[in-house]
Image: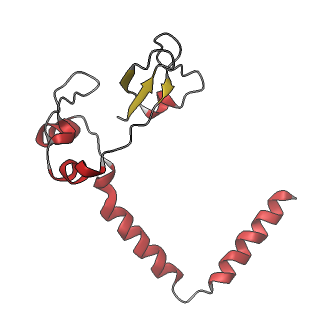
Amino acid sequence: MPTYTFKCPTCGLVRDEFLPLAVYTAPDFAPPACHAPMERFFTPPDPARALDYLISETIYEGLQAPDGADISTRAKHRAYMRDNNLTTIDDFSETWKRAAREREASMAGQDASRVRDIVDAVNRLERG
């Protein structure tokens, strides 16, 4: 589940919220409030610690799932994801590579401008 960081425009309080994407993108979504409705805030990563994040458990420190489960290590996080039938984007890397190879194979020998001509023709028909 994505983590969204919000900051109070009045006092500067910063707060993380674990929200499903469907909740965050819903038309009636209201950000959390402090002194005023909080604004979405992006914390830039520290480039000096980038390697630490990739090779260590640092990113899991103190992490909890939305239901309160402890996922403060890579192993706990993986077990939680597996037990709750959840996945992360890296689980699909081989699927995407295979799909790209299949697309390339299906396009072999075709004139790329022909594909563009077909797309343009469809767009003209839709406009009317």
In the rendered image, the vertical position of residue 110 relative to residue 66, given as above or below = below
The residue most toward the right is 128
Total numbered labels placed on residues in the image: 0
Residue at image x 38%, y 42%?
A: 44
Locate residue 19: give its quadrant: top left
Whole-percent x, y for residue 8 in the image: 47, 19
Locate residue 81: give its quadrant: top left
Q: Is residue 54 left or right of residue 42?
A: left
Give the color scheme: rainbow, by chain, secondary structure or one colour.
secondary structure
Residues 91 and 70: in front is 70
Quarter of the picture containing the N terminus is top left
Whole-percent x, y for residue 11 in the image: 45, 15
Residue at image x 28%, y 54%?
A: 91
In the rendered image, the vertical position of residue 112 relative to residue 43, given as above or below = below
Residues 125 and 22: in front is 22
Quarter of the picture containing the C terminus is bottom right
Whole-percent x, y for residue 10 in the image: 50, 15
Residue at image x 18%, y 49%?
A: 52
Locate residue 59: give its quadrant: top left
Residue at image x 24%, y 34%?
A: 84
The residue most toward the top is 35
Q: Is residue 51 left or right of residue 114?
A: left
In the rendered image, the vertical position of residue 50 relative to residue 113, given as above or below = above
Residues 7 and 66: in front is 7
